Image (tube, rainbow, N blue to C red):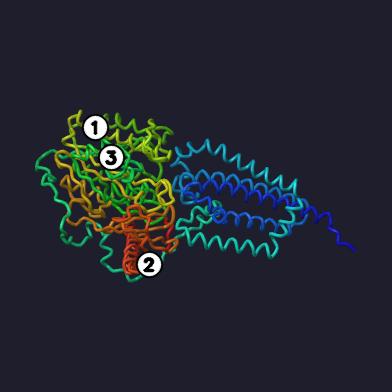
Amino acid sequence: MRNEVSPRSQVRENHSAHAFALFLALVTVMTAARFLILHWPPLRRFLPLLMYQDVLFCFVLAWGFHALFARFPRSRAGLGLLIAAWCVTLLAAAYAAIHVIIYSETSSPLTYFLWVASGQGHGIDASIARALPLAKILIPSAVVLMIAVAESLWRLAPRLVTRMERASFSLPGLLVLAIYVVSADLWVHAHMRNLRPAANPEWAFAASLFDRHQVTLPANIPISYFDDFRPRGDRAPAVARASTVALSPAVTLPSGSRPLNVLMIVMESVGTRSLQLYGAPHPETPEIINLARHGVVFDRIYASEAYSSAAMASLFCSLYPEHGWFNIPRLTPDIDVPGLGDVLASKGYRTAFVHAGALSLDNRKLFLRDHGFHDIIARNEDAPAPSDSALLPLTRSWIGSDFAKPFFLTIWTLDSHHPYFSTSATNFRTGNDRMNRYLNTVHATDTLIGQLARMLSEMKIADNTLIVITGDHGEAFGEHGQMVHGFSVYDEEVHVPLIFVSDKLFPRGMRIDRIGRQIDIAPTILGLLGYDEPPPWQGVNLFADNSPQRAYLFSTSGNFSLGFVEDSFKYIHDFDRNTDELYDLAHDPAETHDLSSDNTRQAQLSRDRLRVDAWLSFQDRYLANFSRSRSRPSSISR
């Protein structure tokens, strides 16, 4: 007698198979999304391997619903589960489309940290606005593709879908999937240093919710290694070293003369890689080159972290960054360390900070107000258009309001931040529209700097003004599989320009080719003015004999990584993957040839690892001494 399938069982199987068609359609959408994001760097030939996490994600969902259909066989419950499967898969398809947009701009999936760090999107309003037209196309397209594939499979080939469902949940089917996933995972880890092109966006975000860096520090760190971070007030007497540059005697101001004004210009997202002054092939900065003829150009200055808020703490309080998800201004905007503005205000300077965008992200305005900036001129939000042209009249008005006192004025530009707003469209022949757009903003920033310098001359205060030109961090354009900034400690993100311009101090231009740090800029300014830096500051005067031997680097937006530059070598330790990298920057400035597998370098790697462990052990505890808050949230457990 034939086994007959009950109507209830048949309905349950139909609902289950229909849901399986949805998950097959979701695999199709995620494959298309993965194909799009593998455009740059070009990895599309590895698509079958790099989509393994997407396939696994879809089949884990399918298994879950398969089990639920078996557990709740009633037809009404099955219909509810089918509706739930539709909702889940459509949402996942829409998120896959959003992931294409996010990845195309950052080369990284969205994580909880990135979402929080951006102020739930408020810190990247301009970038979001630029992406909206693409989102309006991709998200509906993903949903339509999802529906079309699912309904076509179910209505045109229901028996095929049913057979595929049974085969997928059989022992051979599970074995095939396991072999594929394990093999692809092994290949990706063996052949790709950057794992983000293979990251499933849903899992990447979910995993980041539970991401707590577990770091075990060794007990055998040499005490002398901590000297690299000790503040001025706790520093051992410097051992005099032969200077690599002959400094002009004119670096010292005549006694009794009026103090120099200080105009600091911080170029947003501008590193050395984009400047002709530092060897870039693009003729986009003639004004900076002209000013450098009466200034000092530092060739090897490093930002500790490629993030603007961290740069504020480095530039104005001479502090290395917090080793966690959040930066100093966000955690403790009132950190009890004197700012550069505080010191100069106590010497009779009037102080101001001028910006063409908003300062609400990461408590930046609070941090600036609490560290010596009496006047803060900024907007309530970032405008989705070029804004830096407003800086010139704002600066002229503020300086002209009082000539009786010397001033310390910081101008922080905005237009060269992603998405790179510019009024010009010069073709710099990069072959990359994104890079070309960025270089136009750098050129506009250079034009602004030239206008500011001429304004000082027109106001007859140029001879008595020290101009400091630097960048908060650099910008990546795929050099190491990464876009924008904050994700790594490679030179394109952390190597920044620094030029001191003053006819009075530097009648002839010169270059200094030794390591310096962003935290050294404020002590150097005070040294040129004849003032001592506050004891808590971690930086030193770049013109002094005790200039730093190492510049330490940190990144947490991508993998949790620390490193440093010493002589011509850069060492990086990725704590998430427990891997080392070592580059000889003198022979490999692009950082493409990793020397960490060289057996002759193992002793050097061991020493270098202890140095970053020393920094990791020291820094957060040091900063906690100046916290006015009892609780300091951190993402790192030690």
Disc 1, SS: helix
Q: What residue sits right under mark 1 in the picture? A: 399
Along the line of sight, the residue nearer the viewer: 525 or 516: 516
Indicate the position of residue 328 as horizontal and vertical percent values: 36, 51
Q: Is residue 123 left or right of residue 470?
A: right
Q: Amino acid at mark 2?
A: Leu
User: Closer to the camera: disc 3 or disc 2?
Assistant: 3
Q: Residue at x 39, y 63 (%)?
A: 580
Density class for disc 2 (Cα within 10 Å; few <14, some 14-19, many ≥20) is some
Q: Residue at x 70, y 53 (%)?
A: 20
Q: Nearer the viewer, residue 558 or 121?
A: 558
Crowdedness near tag 3: few (<14), some (14–19) or many (≥20) residues, C-alpha within 10 Å: many
Q: Mark 3 — residue? A: 265
Badge nearest the viewer, 2 or 1: 2
84 horizontally vs 595: left or right? right
Residue under the point 60% across and 55% down: 57
Quarter of the figure with the C terminus: bottom left
Q: Does residue 34 lie above or below 574 as drawn?
A: above
Residue at disc 2, secondary structure: loop
Most distant residue in the right direction: 1
Q: Quadrant of residue 163?
A: bottom right
Residue 243, image x and y in percent? 16, 55
Element class at badge 3: strand
The nearer-to-camera label among 1 and 3 is 3
Residue on which disc 2 sits? 217
Q: CA distance from mark 2 to mark 1?
A: 50 Å
Q: Residue flagged by tag 3: what amino acid is it? A: Ile
Q: Which residue shows up at 32% across the image and 71% down it? A: 220
- Please state which amino acid type lies under the numbered disc 1: Ile
Mark closest to the chain's N terminus, 3 or 2: 2
